[in-house]
């Protein structure tokens, strides 16, 4: 772990310059607003090791296929998120020197990410090689209220310098790929130029033809008064901007405010992109810094009103949970069903910026429970939009009659992963989509989405399983052969317990909702049958047979479900047997050694017990947790919060707390030695779920919201809001549990198994059980 950031409940603070950790800091201090995002790199050039990454949501790039000899089922191209133009660039020049803190002395350095208001601050005092000393203050905002806008205030105070200082705000289109092809040209520059007070850069991705246009204008102040100095235009093929400057003496201050508009062909006509972006930049300047900032702060306040968690007595946990919520909302606005959430969000290029099953596991439940806004429905709609492609993906693999295999990795519905043991074998991803659809119905109390769209997806996925299973004559059971479970440290195994069990649940839920829709929505049922060509009786019979006769590996001696066939043949050792210098093992061991070991990236069995908790008693969960947790290395970001929730449910409060901290501060403390590549955005809501579903013990049993709160010994109290079926509840847990219905028409709940009725405005008080 790396712990060089200060602990503060609302801020991320770096109080000295750490060039050896710069890439990690660039990830940690990332800024975004769901339409675009930037790593927290310096506005001015930096000649040493740095990862300057800017990204525009919904923009992807088509790579040439790089697969081996076996190509059936692979797409012609793979999509990935490309680095966009650097719209934040501001160069600082003296008469014959240019600021580069890799080469200048850094006398003091302090930067702060204010999570409550969504503002990044940087303050430093620097000395040039010629002895010129400056104080610099920067404020950087990705506007949450106006999602096409970014604005930056860059201030310089001379401490001992006499002479001219120039500030050079640029739009820089010199872009290289950080990960796969550093010399490959990703963007074409269609046009760059300036007007009297505005610069623009119009770009287009090669091969896919998505366009993004950037425009910027600025204000310049000297000693607090706006100066009307004539700026020098900069017009190059790949850059546009201005140079503005003035003579200063010690004590003088100059400030540049840069207003940037970032528009794309996702939301605007291509022919009008320059006009739209220039107009938005001008409008931002006319509105002014103060008003834009207040609108932006208000947008963040509305988010925190819904989602904030207050933890008393544990500043590290408080900082971590707020950081995770903050970064998730910087990545995804929830207002466009064409967009999803990549594992690194808009903070890095790893995983290609594509969508994984992480979204349905972590993000959909978070949005369903944390906010009354219908954000989760757009994430579900994203998958429905891709259903035709999912059917096409399955057809490539030989499946028929509308069977669908949703991709492991995608931006457009087509599979974008090129490792066969993942692409073709990690097929459990299908079931988490059905799980998320059902969660929407269960937590909202509405069948609208299932009736309108969801059931079509469920039918297509059930058809996939109907064809994917095999019937074993020796076992007289249905089996699923040749798969990779969520634990990717075992590949090409037979009868992965989680895959088999989640297949059953997928089929069971499809049958349940098919019968429900047939009974209560006959017109919609007729439409669904028509568009899916459903043979209800015949297909239902087949699905029911699979449910009743599925093989589920168990070990009766240990009283556990077995990860997959052959797992118990391994040498079963604890992670404590791994030397500390060999962790994480995925960065130190050969793949062959990992596959032969008993060590688990994330436990498949425990994931099934978490998702389908209503089928298992506490003792079953306890036995499996005590068996698998000691062998789990948690080298997946999806793992710690699942284990934390289960530990809380079986009364292991201290273990639950340790795993919660692991999940919550995964990036801030760099548990897996990879924060420099970008943040783990899609697992971040897992830390919120660890509080709500773990420590607060929230479960939905027989359509009733149940609470069984515990409190870690490190905390004096914690509180949060939760939404359930158009009701908003505020829960505070300390020695006394307080539950208040702040919005809604009344709700029956259970606390520690006892029934209560909540009425709006009334507060229920119950003594916490120990």
Image (cartoon, rainbow, N blue to C red):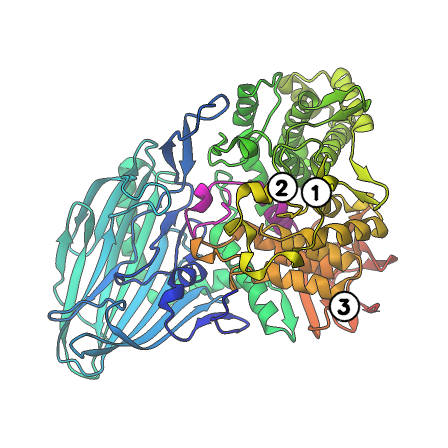
Mark 2 or 3, closer to the camera: 2
Left or right placement of residue 520 versus residue 353 in this view: right
Which residue is found at the position 37% from the left and 33% from the top? 62
The extreme right residue here reads 754
Q: Earlier in the sequence, mark 2 or mark 1?
A: 1
Q: CA distance from mark 3 to mark 1?
A: 48 Å
Which numbered circle lies on residue 596? Answer: 2
- Can you say whether 60 is above or below 347 in the image? above
Residue at mark 3: 738
Disc marking residue 191:
none
Q: Say which mark, if any, is on residue 570.
A: 1
* Residue at 25% from the left image edge and 74% from the top image edge: 156
- Helix, strand or loop for disc 2: helix
Q: Are marks 2 and 1 in contact (CB under 8 Å)?
A: yes
- Residue range corresponding to the magenta coloring: 340-369
Which of labels 3 and 1 is toward the front? 1
Badge 3: few (under 14), some or many (20 or more) residues near its Cα, within 10 Å? some
Q: What secondary structure is marked by label 1?
A: loop
Residue closer to the observer: 574 or 707: 574
Magenta stretch encompasses residue 348: yes
Residue shown at the point (17%, 51%) measured from the top left: 194
């Amino acid at each position: 772990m790396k712990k060089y950031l200060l602990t503060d409940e609302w801020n991320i603070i770096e109080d000295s310059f750490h060039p050896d950790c710069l890439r990690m800091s660039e990830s940690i201090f990332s800024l975004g607003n769901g339409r675009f995002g930037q790593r927290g790199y310096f506005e001015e050039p930096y000649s040493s090791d740095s990862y300057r990454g800017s990204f525009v949501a919904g923009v992807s790039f088509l790579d040439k296929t790089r697969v081996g000899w076996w190509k059936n089922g692979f797409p012609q191209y793979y999509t990935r998120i490309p680095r966009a133009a650097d719209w934040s660039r501001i160069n600082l020049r003296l008469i014959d020197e240019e600021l580069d803190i890799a080469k200048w002395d850094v006398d003091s350095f302090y930067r702060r990410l204010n999570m409550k208001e969504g503002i990044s601050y940087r303050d430093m005092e620097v000395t040039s090689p010629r002895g010129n000393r400056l104080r610099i203050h920067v404020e950087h905002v990705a506007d949450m209220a106006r999602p096409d806008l970014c604005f930056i205030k860059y201030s310089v105070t001379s401490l001992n310098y006499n002479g001219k200082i120039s500030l050079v705000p640029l739009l820089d289109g010199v872009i290289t790929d950080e990960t796969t092809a550093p010399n490959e040209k990703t963007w074409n520059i269609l046009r760059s130029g300036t007007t009297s007070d505005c610069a623009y850069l119009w770009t287009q991705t090669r091969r896919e033809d998505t366009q993004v246009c950037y425009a910027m204008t600025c204000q310049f102040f000297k000693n607090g008064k706006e100066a009307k100095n004539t700026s020098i235009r900069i017009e190059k093929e790949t850059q546009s901007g201005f140079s503005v400057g003035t003579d200063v003496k010690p004590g003088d201050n100059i400030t540049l405010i840069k207003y940037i508009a970032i528009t794309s062909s996702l939301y605007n006509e291509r022919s009008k992109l320059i006009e739209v972006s220039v107009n938005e930049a001008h409008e931002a300047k006319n509105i002014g810094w103060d008003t834009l900032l207040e609108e932006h702060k208000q947008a963040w306040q509305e988010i925190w009103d819904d989602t904030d968690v207050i933890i008393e007595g544990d500043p590290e946990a408080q900082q971590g949970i707020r950081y995770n919520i903050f970064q998730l909302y910087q990545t995804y606005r929830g207002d466009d069903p064409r967009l999803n959430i990549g594992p690194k969000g808009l903070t890095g290029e790893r995983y290609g910026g594509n969508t994984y099953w992480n979204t349905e596991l972590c993000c959909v439940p978070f949005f369903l429970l944390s906010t009354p806004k219908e954000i989760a429905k757009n994430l579900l709609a994203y998958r429905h939009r891709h259903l035709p492609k999912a059917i096409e993906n399955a057809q490539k693999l030989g499946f028929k009659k509308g069977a669908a295999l949703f991709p492991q990795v995608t931006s457009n519905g087509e599979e974008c992963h090129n490792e066969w043991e993942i692409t073709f074998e990690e097929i459990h991803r299908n079931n988490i989509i059905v799980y998320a659809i059902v969660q929407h119905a269960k937590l909202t109390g509405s069948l609208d989405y299932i009736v309108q769209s969801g059931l079509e997806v469920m039918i297509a996925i059930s058809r996939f399983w109907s064809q994917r299973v095999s019937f074993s004559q020796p076992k007289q059971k249905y089996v699923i052969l040749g798969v990779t479970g969520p634990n990717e440290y075992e590949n090409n195994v037979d009868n992965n317990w989680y895959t088999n069990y989640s297949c059953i649940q997928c089929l069971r839920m499809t049958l349940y909702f098919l019968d429900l829709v047939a009974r209560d929505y006959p017109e919609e049922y007729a439409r669904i049958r028509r568009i899916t060509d459903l043979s209800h009786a015949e297909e239902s019979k087949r699905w029911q047979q699979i449910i009743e006769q599925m093989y589920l590996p168990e070990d009766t001696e240990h009283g556990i479900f077995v990860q997959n066939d052959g797992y118990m043949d391994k040498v079963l050792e604890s992670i404590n047997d791994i030397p500390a210098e060999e962790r994480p093992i995925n960065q130190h061991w050969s793949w062959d050694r990992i596959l032969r070991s008993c060590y688990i990236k994330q436990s498949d069995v425990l994931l099934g017990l978490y998702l389908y908790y209503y089928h298992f008693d506490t003792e079953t969960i306890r036995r499996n947790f005590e068996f698998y947790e000691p062998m789990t290395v948690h080298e997946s970001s999806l793992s710690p919060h699942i284990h934390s929730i289960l530990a809380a449910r079986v009364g292991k409060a201290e273990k639950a707390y340790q795993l919660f901290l692991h999940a919550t501060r995964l990036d801030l403390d760099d548990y897996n030695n990879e924060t420099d590549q970008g943040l783990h955005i899609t697992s971040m809501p897992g830390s919120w779920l660890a509080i709500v579903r773990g420590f607060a013990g929230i479960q939905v049993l027989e359509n009733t919201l149940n609470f069984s709160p515990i409190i870690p010994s490190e905390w004096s109290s914690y509180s949060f809001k939760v939404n359930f079926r158009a009701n908003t509840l505020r829960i505070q847990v300390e020695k006394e549990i307080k539950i208040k219905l702040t919005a809604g028409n009344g709700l029956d709940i259970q606390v520690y198994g006892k029934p209560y009725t909540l009425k709006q405005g009334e507060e229920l008080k119950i003594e916490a059980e120990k």
